[in-house]
Amino acid sequence: MKLKIIIATLLFSLIFNGCKQTPESQTKENYLDFSKRDDQWTGGIKIIPIKTPVGNFKVWTKRVGNNPTIKVLLLHGGPGVTHELYECFDGYFPNESIEYIYYDQLGSYYSDQPTDKKLWTNERFVEEVEQVRIALNLNKDNFYLLGQSWGGILAMEYALKYQQNLKGLIISNMMASAPEYNKYAEEVLGPKLPTEVFNQIKTFEKNKDYTNPKYTELLFKYYYTEHILRKPLEEWPEAVNRCFKHLNPNVYIHMQGPSEFGITGDASLKNWDIKSKLKTLTIPTLVIGAKHDTMDPEHMKWISKEVQNGRFLFCPNGSHLSQYDDQKTYFNGLIKFLRDVDSVKFKKG
């Protein structure tokens, strides 16, 4: 009789525990359930009103998935490109039940595109991100900010002012100093090109002949396929080509300048440098660098040690868009960081 009771108890326990849901299984089950969201009728798209010193505008966002503790806002590069550079995230984040938000900054293709140059400042963009955060109900219990290239500048600037709102920060493929980026491009990357090619490119730039088709041809053939995305041009993903097609040159040239060898001319970011402020960042921070990047990976490694709770992810086969050309390394490391912070298992290093 006792044996029957024991067996029955074990069976009941197994059945009960097997049916009991964990928070993780509940998240996975509800990940694609938009039924309780106000953006269900638009498929996750929300147009957010933005107040600026020169008027009110609107920016485009699109949320994918539901996760109460991991929500990643994606800051694209440029300035003036689009969220389309991140479309490969669709191949990785949903399977991990990670919620993420596409977002076109003001001036970019899917958002309003005003022409007043007074809008294109770091300070104004930081306040835009803060307004987006509030509109999407992101907070310190769920809000991760991922910025790549110019988006990395914006992410660092946002964190320096508003880190109390963040759960985690990801700085992808961006140094903390424009002058040091310029030096790396001029002294390290440029000389790696064939001498005659580098000399031709420098001549075009000296003459400010940036619209010359030959200048563009040389950049794409010898520089972009080595340091932007390490694949033959005919193999570049459609989303990347579409993103560059949608670039807003007015924003890009004003802030970045016309050259691809650093930030030059009268570009507003030319002297940007926040190295001395990094030590004030206390939130968990992942810094991503790549061997063939336009940015110095050693500098990115230094950033990870300069912040108080940093971790470095190195993509040995990657370049500036290492989410494409070293995809497995990039996403494995990124997802591990998000999981570790979420489960309070984050360790520096």
Image (spheres, rainbow, N blue to C red):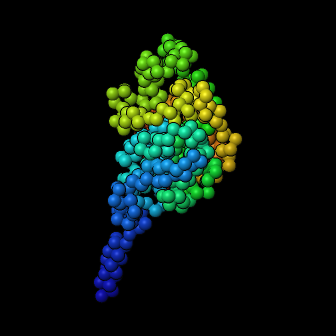
Left or right: 33 with respect to 249? left
Quarter of the image for residue 202 reads top right
Q: Is residue 79 above or below residue 55?
A: above
Which of the pair 104/194 is nearer the observer? 104
Seen at 36% across and 53% down, the residue is 95
Residue 187 can be seen in this image? yes
Left or right: 41 with respect to 291? left
Seen at 38% across and 59% down, the residue is 39
Q: Residue furthest front?
A: 55
User: Count of labels shown?
Assistant: 0
Provide residue 341's location: percent of width, then percent of height: 53, 55
Provide residue 121's location: percent of width, then percent of height: 59, 41
Seen at 52% across and 50% down, the residue is 56
Indicate the quadrant containing the N terminus: top left, top right, bottom left or bottom right. bottom left
Which of the pair 195/115 is nearer the observer? 115
Left or right: 250 with respect to 348? left
Q: Is residue 280 above or below residue 250?
A: below
Q: Residue furthest top?
A: 196
